[in-house]
Image (cartoon, rainbow, N blue to C red):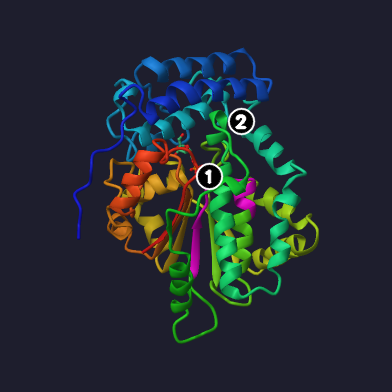
Amino acid sequence: MPHELPPPILISPEGSFAWDVFHRRHPVLIESLLAALPYGPEQVRALRALLDESLDGVITPLADDAPDAAQWHGPWDRGHYGKPWADTPFLWAESYFFRRILAATGYYGGSGSGSGWGSAEPAWAGVDPYQPMKDAELADPALEAAFAWYGALEGAEPERRFAALVEAAVLGNRADLVFQVTETVEGYAAVNPPLADDTGGIRSRLLAARGGTQVAGPRVAVICDNSGRELLADLLLADELLGPASLAAVVELHVKPAPYYISDATATDFGKALRRLRGMPAALGAAGQRLFAHAAAGRLRAQTHPFWCSPLSFHDLPADLRAGLDGRFLLVKGDLNYRRLVGDRWWDPTTPFADTVRHLGLPVAALRAAKSDVVVGLSRGQVERLDKTEPDWRLNGRHSLVQTA
Ligand SMILES: O=P(O)(O)OC[C@H]1O[C@](O)(CO)[C@@H](O)[C@@H]1O
């Protein structure tokens, strides 16, 4: 049944999760950026000015000569420039904040004054401000032990392998670096069973999509979220999809065209993660080798599109991207992508998942640890119990969802 879209989540009121992200998480984030790379006075000033502006100022547009000004001043403009940040939809404002970090650090060249383009001080151009944090996560020697379970899957039934790999891809989403700016991720053992678990449904849809050929499944488009631990798990899932069960003919990893939300995966991160995996021992390293071969054969592809760094929900997919996704099975990873998939709105959590993704017109699965207010597809009983026993259940990252439609 079609639902009217509920109201969007705004940054205000004070005390809401979105308010907390801007007023508690972002100040810590800006300090971490300043501590991570030796920025000069221009970048330091610009980062601090951005923070001040976002806490109680009005939204300044990008300079007209910013490389993506045409998008931000065109189809992505929702009339928020010149208005107070506090009155702005959370999704738009948070995404724009991350774009403005790139302007402030000079990622697109420029002085860091907020324009981000065309000045004579290009030293930080192309430098990912989050690279030190991403590199530290990928260099962690504990990763081998954290993925040791993978070796034990050898010889396991295909259903069990698939379920374990989906679970790892969901659990990997807990480890994102935005969340860790202010929250702690406990050991995986502390996680609850998923609030919704349609892992079996995903597998049967992929099998069904093989149709009469029985040779290979559909093209699967993974709308990636974080690099590091999450991307390693996603790569192992991709290997499984391309493996003997032939659940996918091709896996496209849709990564971000630029650094975004701290740990979001770019093509650089894809390369680094796959190299890290290939360097691991035994079954993990073998999976890395296979994935390199799949990449060379065109069965594993990293793809990107400017829209993945836009401040909009998937209701606004541009025509060229929508056409490029046609015929794909979408695997949508993570919390931010979930917000963009169903819409960053005050959904009644008992709204059926299928109703919220119908706008896409594509088969889709969402794999996500809950870290924001948006949630759909639960039963009234679940919601009442959680509201009573664990008031921050939507936000604390201890609950996950595996949903498909
Ligand atoms: O990496 P993910 O899973 O998209 O999570 C991003 C995090 O940042 C947020 O956008 C809030 O800052 C939440 O949605 C979530 O806590």
Helix, strand or loop at label 1? It is loop
Counting from the top left corner in percent of width and height, residue 60 is at 38, 21
Quarter the C terminus occupies: bottom left
Counting from the top left corner in percent of width and height, residue 218 is at 48, 72
Up the image or down, 319 lies above or below 389; here it is below
Q: Quadrant of residue 6?
A: top left
- Amino acid type indicated by mark 1: Pro
Quarter the N terminus occupies: bottom left
Q: Is residue 373 visible?
A: no
| Viewer-closest of 143 and 184 | 184
Q: Which residues are magenta?
A: 219-232
Residue 221 sits inside the magenta stretch: yes
Q: Earlier in the sequence, mark 1 or mark 2?
A: 2
* Outermost residue to the bottom: 212
Q: Crowding near pointer 2: few (<14 within 10 Å), some, many (20+)?
A: many
Q: Is residue 172 left or right of residue 326?
A: right
- Amino acid type indicated by mark 2: Pro
Looking at the image, which residue is at 27% across and 30% down?
79
| Viewer-closest of 153 and 139 | 153
Counting from the top left corner in percent of width and height, residue 173 is at 54, 47
Q: Crowding near pointer 1: few (<14 within 10 Å), some, many (20+)?
A: some
The disc placed on residue 129 is 2
Counting from the top left corner in percent of width and height, residue 185 is at 58, 38
List the residue tagged with mark 1.
257
The disc placed on residue 235 is none
Residue 263 sits inside the magenta stretch: no
Helix, strand or loop at label 2? It is loop
Looking at the image, which residue is at 71% across and 37% down?
136
